[in-house]
Amino acid sequence: MRPAILFPLFAPVTSLPGLGPRLGKLAEKLAGPHVVDLLWHKPVGVVDRIQVPSIAEAPDGRHVVLTVRVDGHMPSLTPSRPYRIRCTDHTGSMDLVYFHIKGDWLEKKLPVGSKITVSGKAEYYNNHLQIAHPDHAAPADEGAPPSATEPTYPLTGGLNPKPLRTAIQAALTRAPQLPEWQDAAWLRARDWPDWHSALTRLHHPVDEADINPLGPVRQRLAFDELLANQLALVLVRAQQRKLSGRVTQGDGRMRAAVAAALPYRLTGAQERSLAEIYADMAEPSRMLRLLQGDVGSGKTIVALMCMLNAVETGAQAALMAPTEILARQHAETLAPLCQAAGVRMAVLTGRDKGKARAALLERLAAGEIDILVGTHALFQEEVMFADLAIAVIDEQHKFGVHQRLQLAAKGRGVDTLVMTATPIPRTLTLTVYGDMDVSRLDEKPPGRQPVKTVVMHADRLEEVAGGLSRAIASGQRIYWVCPLVEESEQVDLAAATHRHATLVERLGDRVGLIHGKMKGPDKDKVMADFAEGRLDVLVATTVIEVGVNVPEATIMVIEHAERFGLAQLHQLRGRVGRGTGASTCLLLYYQPLGEVARQRLQVMKDTEDGFIIAEKDLELRGAGEMLGTKQSGIPEFRLADIAVHGELLAVARDDAKLIITRDPELETERGKALRTLLYLFERDAAVKYLRSG
């Protein structure tokens, strides 16, 4: 149960003054449904007003407070012209300017001849002072103007600053004094305020330092949020460790057969990762490990070896991929190796129906299939294993945690290995996969060629297309990636269908097209035609981003490269350079090229190291956007910014581990305060893992 002291913070936002049903909906859309969500809605700036004695002394571009006399109203004659109120004092005149407004209420509120106090940003237009939409304009005897400093907040259409500020101030009065959950010595060392003071200062900033992410106020609040996140992950991890697992140690005969069948030796990183995985599998507790490997670092072979470790003991293994293309491709890669080791492998996707599917499920339940490769179809209830010992999940961020658990529930004490080809910065690995141990493949298999990356303006498109004819003549295969499926009126991008048509015209009918709206079998056919050399060029949307493997493809053209994120560009580039031939990636950009896009293209030109690229991506875009927060399982932080507070995250991680080691059930005074912290940041799920929670 949420502690009663927090009840006022979890009341609906509509319970705050000034937020009726209409504005309440807007505030909920902007910040969230509860009072506490408004407290997490951070100011983005501070208005610093100065009291100015006269119009003549008002500095351009500053927020000023002035006392003036209303001289006349000048209504707008056309909708495009503003409504003006001419004001004067002993030094000259100025205008108050209002756009899209009916003047009747202004004439009543600010009658001609009255003395008024106004506050707003002073600007000179045609050498004449004006204040557009003053934030305060009222008769001088009607009380003081707004305070000297005031926070400004992000807004949404229809919600004005005034009611939002009023609601946030009301929310602040409901924030209780909570017991301190941070270590006292740590707070003293950092010179941080207590929680309540930090929150008050955030919404009553004295200057910019109070809202600066690196200032003590924001750092204190960010650390609270990060500690709640890390403590929740450590509790979940501790709970996982309590679940009984199984000891899995094969005799190595199948793995030796596969190693002998491979045309190359495993890299040092592969050997190291396998040693870590085998050690986990030999433990009586369940393995939960993340295998991070850049594009083409050899994750599939590592996955096969650890599945064989289980198969050697007579158990079964499952490998799950997010798309049918990827599942079938894993199966193609593994088939000859499984054959060499005498391992029975099968594939199950949503497309398998009827008698064939029933027969496959029967063999699986009877233990006649050792390794099952598939898509989401593996979760289905009727999919029963005789004895599942290990589940390997590829591209975890495309699946939710509950799906991971569903698959693990199909066996007894199932070990789980999660793989991702999206290199994730270390700080993000902690927030997304903090409940897992991590292995990294940071070397490329021998024989992999570096990819030459060229950045060029799209006005050289003709030249590029001409070069493709020569490349095709020499037996090369080419990907051409476009960002859209069809022409869109709003965004005039060269669409895949249009580009396909122009390339067919130029290069003939050996140009294929693949996009997300095509049916599975049609996609597979085009991919197979390209992989087997019946097509020379594949025009595609980003459906080819993950896992497609055609070693003969040596050229990647990415059109509108400035519209892609760094991680996406890196993934796409990884589709070439998979064979022994020299490969090229052409990044075609259109103007105008923004500063961030320019930096992105430069990073792509400078390095092929996915981990360096990921760190740079985090720096340029921030965490939420980097992996697309909604589908990636990244917690949405409200007060912390991973790109800025990475160092605090590592401290929070260590602190959380130490807390659980010393006080596993959070029963000490600090432990009880930490329970409140978990509820405050809605990490309630973690609290239920505590014995007395």
Image (spheres, rainbow, N blue to C red):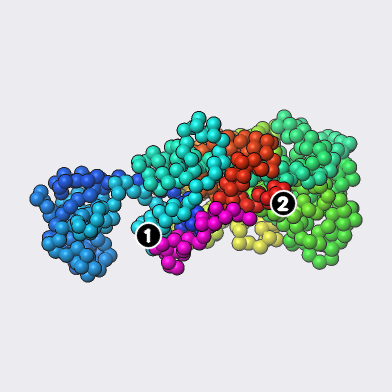
**Residue 41: image location, x then y, percent:** 45, 51
Q: Horizontal placement of 101 versus 286: left or right?
A: left
Write down the residue under mark 2: 404
Residues at circles 2 and 1 in contact by the CB criterion of under 8 Å:
no
Q: Nearer the viewer, residue 324 or 550?
A: 324
State whether residue 481 is above or below residue 252.
Answer: below
Q: Nearer the viewer, residue 164 or 320?
A: 164
Q: Kindly give the residue lying farthest to the bottom in the view shown.
A: 104
Which residue is drawn at the image coordinates 24% and 68% (left, top)?
105
Quadrant in which the N terminus is drawn: bottom right
Q: Is residue 11 magenta?
A: yes
Q: Indicate the amino acid at tag 2.
A: Arg
Q: Horizontal placement of 382 versus 519: left or right?
A: right
**Residue 325: image location, x then y, percent:** 69, 53
Write down the residue under mark 1: 163
Which residue is drawn at the image coordinates 35% and 41% (left, top)?
207
Comparing labels 2 and 1, the label whose residue is closer to the camera:
1
* Span shown in magenta: 1-29
State whether residue 255 is above or below residue 122.
Answer: above
First of labels 2, 1 by sequence position: 1
**Residue 505: image location, x then y, percent:** 54, 56
Q: Nearer the viewer, residue 157 or 615?
A: 157
Which residue is drawn at the image coordinates 56% and 41% (left, top)?
181
Q: Horizontal placement of 15 versus 406: left or right?
A: left
Mark 2–mark 1 Cα distance, whole angstroms, equals: 44 Å
